[in-house]
Image (cartoon, rainbow, N blue to C red):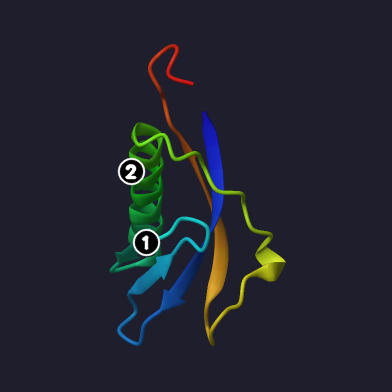
Amino acid sequence: MNFTYPAVFHPKKDGSYEGYFPDLKGCTFSGATLDDAINDAIEEERQWIMVEADEDNGFPFVSDAEDIELGEGDFIREIAVIVHFEVGYY
């Protein structure tokens, strides 16, 4: 299955990045560079989805990027992942 959720990226003074997924409670990421943060965001999103699937909690709706409040310097990227479930899982 394909999942795409908006992620909020916050650049830090040291050039690194941190961020979170507004729709995925507690799902955060970071990286020394933007590429590292994107890669971490992909992995964290995938892991979050796998845990929720295992707990049978369902998946949250995707927020419209225009509805997400941003801090100074923050920006949004849509992060897409493909999650493979066992046949008959869903």
Residue 35, quarter of the rendered image: bottom left
Q: Residue at x 43, y 65 (%)?
A: 20
Which mark is on residue 26?
A: 1
Question: Residue 49, position in %: x, y?
Answer: 41, 41
- 65 with respect to 2 (left or right): right
Most foreground residue, 77 or 33: 77
Q: Is the residue marked by circle 2 packed among few (<14), some (14-19), or many (20+) residues within 10 Å?
A: some
What is the tally of numbered marks visible in this picture?
A: 2
Q: Residue at x 41, y 57 (%)?
A: 38
Most foreground residue, 25 or 10: 25
Question: Residue 30, position in %: x, y?
Answer: 32, 66
Residue 19 sits above or below residue 36 on the image: below
Foreground disc of the pair 1, 2: 1
The secondary structure type at the circle numbered 2 is: helix
Please, what is the three-letter code of the amino acid marked with disc 1? Gly
The secondary structure type at the circle numbered 1 is: loop
N-terminal of the two: label 1 or label 2? Answer: 1
Q: Is the residue marked by circle 1 packed among few (<14), some (14-19), or many (20+) residues within 10 Å?
A: few
Residue 72 sits above or below residue 81 on the image: below
- 42 with respect to 77 (left or right): left
Task: Give how far apart the Cα atoms at labels 1 and 2 are.
Answer: 12 Å
Please, what is the three-letter code of the amino acid marked with disc 2? Gln
Residue 68, quarter of the rendered image: bottom right
Question: Residue 60, position in %: x, y?
Answer: 55, 48
Question: Residue 69, position in %: x, y?
Answer: 61, 77
Disc 1 to disc 2: CB gap under 8 Å: no
Which mark is on residue 76?
A: none
Most foreground residue, 59 or 32: 59
Q: Residue at x 34, y 33 (%)?
A: 54
Which mark is on residue 47?
A: 2
